[in-house]
Image: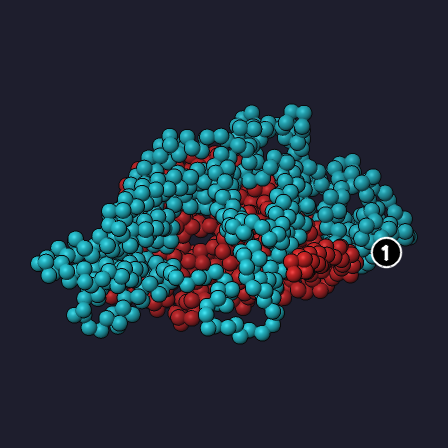
Chain colours: A cyan, B red
């Protein structure tokens, strides 16, 4: 490339081309750090920096609310850094590198670190929140109505301003027509003459109190749910905005013994910090647990638990076969067609090309579902068309073949496209020269075309391999990993590591994010090693041929 | 020039910052103002169909009480999304869903118990109240029940079969006469379907969980893998691909109703959701309970309940409780939700109201009368996958004893 591509200034330097644009006069460009300031450039700069400021302000409020000071410090430092960088005239390379770096950190490094840290925890269903969350949940869910207690009609009132004044529950007993006022201090009987009660039994007006309407009351939702009026048998709690009941929290946390006690049965559940749950002496576990660090437990479980490690290595083998098969077959078919259409004797190539691209143009997601139905034993098109009676997704090998066939159909147009492109770049003189030397077409293909093709396509093949190694859709939408052996519902014949992991993390049997992230770390390591080896080999190959 | 640039940028930046700050400052008084006038906001999450039915009622509730009500449709993985969102503090105030989510939502601290008065409780169908009760607490307000039944094409099969053997005989006859290509449309797929096979499983004598003294399901007494479950699956195996061919893995959730409406099978085991398709296809049909094995126990389908839940971490819990306990308990809402998707309302008054207009409803309800409440305990989550896959393997011809024993072992291993 001889022409400079370094911005709008370059056009001016080209002889014979004068800028026709009117507007701000431009200062001539003398050195790099005296680049001209254009109106467009300025506007873009202002808009982008304004956007940065806006995003920072928008992000700051939730951080302040959550008292996430470290996050806030990072946010402030990043924003200040960005402003400094783009307002100063120095650090030109950094101006280009920083946006990419920030996105890399936010969308690559951070998720990877988060995944890695999750692998050391028991994060999953029943162990999602903190211990405090679990205690609150246990206590709230143990609140029971005191047997035989009154169901009150409730009105929310305050003595002061509706939005800030201390709340009072105005209660009326629908049976006895007695009225009470209750707050954190307890329940007081009111004089029936001081209040107005509606026909439905609700207090609509009381001397000395402001009765809140629903709208006002619901604005103070948290105060209302937090207010409990202590009574002899328990406490009066609100039930919505119009009813109240006398309830009792049967289970309470006791920090002294780090346990939960049931006041009715006397049973205690002691905290087990290793597993993040409350366990009773008889082994009964309370449902609400919390997230704890479990160290390397997930890793050792993947490697040693026969239910996981056994299928893990079997699945790994099939995973390689699937990725190599999908990539290899599509490449072979795509290249063969590309070669055929590349032949100068071929007629109507454009029509063929359009037809060949069709599978590529359809959404693979929908096509996978269509193929799943086409492989149905009794109603599927494949068996009907060929008069077969194969239980495609019922047998180990037939399911694997079916999955590879679907991949072949979906994937060869891509390989055809890239192979066509690469073939155009190989000069015909080279193959003509070999034929002059007396080589057969096959020999010239082997010795000249294929090596040159591979140099161009190797990176794409490796990328395709990595993609197919984790091709969730291909399996999830067709076989769902099946067929499964009768005695092993965890791991199917066509399961890839990623579909197996997906089932662990989001499967019907409850989420196990900790274990699932551990498996994905193993997957990451495998793909990284395979890619590293292949790329280093490609480089060597390029050195040979270039 | 340089100074001017920096100045302009700085001024604009300041202006932006100021407007940002100003916006947030003015937010607070505005919120106070609205608290006086209209008050808080109630956010409800439901699936697509229910969202449409709920909207007018939610708006009315909002208008009556001077609050804003927003009904948001979550079309996929509502439960998972709700649990995750609630954990992050960004969830709704009320969520609408199936009662078997309760165990999982409770163990994740995502929902709170609801308090219904004795009178309110007695307005509901007893099974529905039992379904939403977990660990002795009421966790949701039910609005509809659902169960599967046998839907048959009365042109092909005028008589309701008394036993599954009668059904197979009738189906085989139709197949021999080339009037149908399948004996029975009971969805299984390659990975099985525990929900649809369950009536046959109970008829064969199998059970999932025993019950504790107070009538709750007991996760420690697992029936899968016990001799009763093996006996039940030995009977099911006889109906499978290596036996009568009435149960087939090629009949999946996607094609079972279509095969029935395409008149390729005379019998369909499905729920009220299949009726719309049957009507559209102009099939003369009738609904009867799923038949059991001759001489076997009663065939009991699962009874599921759809309910409203109060989110534990909702921002407006008091309003959410008000909505769920005092508004959802009104029959009008139940009737409207029935019209959006015909499933028997859980409120007796609402059920009686729509029963007269819709004969199918009464028949479905009759078919579910002896059904079993779908267990809501967290341990149930461990059942679905292994049980279904074992079912598929047995239908495909695997040895029932070995398969079910292994499935029982897997399930027991997953129950913590």
Tell me which corner region of the image, top left, top right, bottom left or bottom right, holds residue A316: top left
Residue that mark 1 sits on: A205
Q: Residue at x 17, y 56 (%)?
A: A445
- Of B358 and A92, the residue lying toward us: A92
Residue A72, x across and y down, in percent: 65, 44
Image quadrant holding the N terminus of chain B, namely: bottom right
Tell me which corner region of the image, top left, top right, bottom left or bottom right, holds residue B275: bottom left
Q: Is residue A432 above or below residue A117?
A: below
Disc 1 sits on a residue from what chain? Answer: A
Q: Is residue A5 above or below residue A489?
A: below
Residue B358, x across and y down, in percent: 51, 66
Residue count near mark 1 (Cα–Cα under 10 Å), binned few <14, some 14–19, many ≥20: some
Q: Residue at x 55, y 73 (%)?
A: A21
Q: Is residue B218 visible?
A: no
- Of A125 and A66, the residue lying toward us: A66
Tell me which corner region of the image, top left, top right, bottom left or bottom right, holds residue A518: top left
Q: Is residue A345 above or below residue B165?
A: below
Mark 1 element type: strand
Residue B321, x across and y down, in percent: 68, 51
Q: Residue at x 60, y 72 (%)?
A: A23
Q: Is B345 on the left or on the right of A433, as rendered?
A: right
Q: Residue at x 82, y 58 (%)?
A: A198
């Amino acid at each position: 490339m001889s022409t400079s591509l370094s911005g709008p200034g370059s056009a001016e330097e080209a002889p014979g081309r004068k800028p026709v644009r009117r507007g701000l006069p431009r200062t001539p460009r003398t050195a790099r750090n005296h680049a001209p300031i254009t109106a467009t450039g300025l506007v873009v700069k202002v808009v982008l920096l304004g956007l940065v400021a806006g995003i920072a302000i928008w992000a700051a409020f939730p951080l302040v609310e959550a008292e996430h000071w470290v996050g806030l410090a990072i946010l402030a430092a990043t924003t200040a850094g960005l402003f400094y960088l783009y307002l100063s005239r120095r650090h030109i390379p950094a101006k280009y590198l920083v946006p990419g770096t920030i996105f890399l950190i936010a969308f690559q490094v951070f998720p990877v670190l988060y995944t890695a840290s999750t692998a050391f925890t028991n994060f999953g269903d029943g162990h999602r929140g903190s211990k405090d969350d679990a205690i609150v949940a246990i206590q709230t869910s143990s609140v029971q109505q005191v047997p035989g207690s009154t169901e009150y009609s409730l009105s929310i009132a305050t003595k002061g301003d509706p939005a800030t004044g201390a709340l009072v529950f105005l209660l009326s007993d629908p049976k006895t027509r007695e009225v009470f006022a209750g707050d954190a201090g307890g329940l007081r009987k009111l004089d029936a003459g001081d209040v107005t009660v509606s026909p439905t039994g609700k207090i609509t007006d009381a001397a000395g109190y402001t009765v809140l309407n629903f709208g006002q009351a619901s604005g103070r939702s948290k105060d209302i749910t937090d207010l409990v009026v202590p009574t002899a048998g328990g406490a009066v709690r609100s039930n919505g905005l119009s009813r109240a009941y006398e309830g009792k929290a049967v289970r309470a946390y006791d920090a002294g013994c780090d346990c939960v006690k049931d006041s009715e049965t006397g049973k205690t559940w002691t905290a087990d910090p290793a597993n993040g749950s409350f366990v009773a002496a008889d082994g009964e576990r309370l449902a609400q647990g919390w997230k704890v660090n479990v160290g390397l437990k997930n890793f050792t479980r993947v490697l040693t638990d026969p239910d996981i490690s056994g299928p893990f290595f079997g699945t790994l083998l099939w995973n390689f076969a699937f990725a190599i098969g999908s990539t290899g077959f599509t490449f072979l078919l795509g290249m063969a067609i590309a070669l055929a259409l590349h032949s100068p004797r071929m007629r109507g190539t454009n029509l063929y090309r359009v037809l060949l691209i069709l599978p590529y143009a359809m959404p693979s997601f929908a096509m996978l579902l269509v193929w799943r139905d086409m492989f149905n034993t009794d109603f599927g098109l494949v068996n009907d068309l060929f008069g077969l009676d194969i239980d495609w997704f019922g047998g180990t090998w037939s399911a694997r073949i079916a999955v590879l066939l679907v991949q072949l159909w979906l994937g060869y147009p891509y390989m055809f496209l890239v192979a066509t492109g690469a073939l155009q770049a190989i000069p015909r003189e080279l193959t003509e020269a070999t034929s002059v030397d007396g080589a057969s077409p096959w020999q010239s293909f082997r010795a000249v075309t294929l090596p040159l093709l591979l140099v161009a396509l190797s990176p794409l093949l490796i990328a395709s391999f990595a993609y197919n190694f984790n091709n969730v859709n291909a399996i999830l939408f067709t076989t769902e990993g099946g067929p499964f052996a009768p005695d092993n519902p965890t791991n199917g014949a066509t399961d890839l590591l990623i579909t197996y992991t997906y089932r662990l993390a989001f499967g019907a049997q409850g989420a196990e994010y900790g274990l699932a992230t551990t498996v994905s770390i193993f997957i990451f390591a495998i793909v990284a090693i395979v890619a590293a080896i292949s790329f280093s080999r490609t480089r060597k190959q390029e050195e040979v041929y270039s | 020039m340089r100074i001017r640039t920096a100045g302009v940028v700085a001024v604009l930046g300041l202006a932006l910052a100021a407007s940002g700050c100003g916006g947030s400052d003015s937010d607070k008084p505005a919120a106070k103002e609205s608290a006086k006038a209209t008050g808080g906001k109630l956010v409800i999450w439901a699936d697509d169909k229910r969202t449409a039915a709920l909207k007018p009622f939610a708006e009315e509730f909002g208008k009556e009480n001077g609050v804003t009500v927003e009904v948001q449709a979550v079309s996929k993985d509502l439960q998972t999304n709700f649990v995750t969102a609630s954990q992050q503090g960004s969830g709704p105030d009320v969520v609408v869903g199936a009662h078997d989510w309760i165990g999982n939502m409770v163990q994740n601290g995502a929902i709170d118990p609801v308090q219904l008065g004795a009178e309110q409780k007695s307005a509901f169908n007893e099974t529905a109240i039992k379904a939403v009760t977990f660990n002795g607490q009421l966790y949701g307000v039910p609005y509809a029940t659902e169960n599967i039944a046998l839907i048959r094409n009365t042109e092909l099969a005028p008589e309701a079969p008394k036993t599954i053997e009668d059904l197979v005989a009738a189906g085989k006859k139709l197949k021999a006469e080339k009037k149908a290509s399948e004996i029975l449309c009971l969805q299984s797929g390659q990975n099985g379907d525990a929900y649809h096979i369950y009536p046959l499983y109970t008829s064969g004598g199998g059970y999932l969980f025993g019950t504790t003294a107070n009538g709750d399901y007991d996760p420690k007494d697992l029936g899968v893998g016990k001799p009763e479950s093996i006996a039940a699956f030995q009977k099911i195996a006889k109906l499978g691909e290596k036996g009568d061919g009435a149960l087939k893995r090629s009949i999946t959730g996607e094609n079972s109703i279509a095969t029935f409406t395409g008149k390729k099978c005379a019998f369909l085991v499905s729920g009220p959701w299949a009726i719309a398709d049957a009507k559209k296809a102009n099939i003369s049909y009738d609904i009867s309970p799923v038949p059991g094995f001759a001489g076997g126990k009663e065939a009991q389908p699962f009874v599921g309940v759809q309910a409203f839940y109060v989110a534990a971490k909702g921002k407006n819990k008091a309003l959410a409780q008000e909505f769920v306990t005092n508004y959802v308990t009104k029959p009008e809402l139940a009737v409207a939700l029935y019209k959006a998707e015909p499933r028997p309302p859980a409120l007796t008054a609402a059920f009686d109201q729509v029963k007269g207009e819709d004969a199918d409803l009464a028949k479905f309800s009759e078919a579910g009368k002896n059904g079993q409440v779908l267990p809501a305990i967290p341990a149930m989550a461990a059942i679905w996958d292994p049980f279904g896959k074992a079912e598929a393997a047995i239908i495909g011809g695997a040895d029932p004893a070995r398969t079910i024993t292994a499935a029982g072992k897997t399930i027991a291993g997953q129950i913590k």
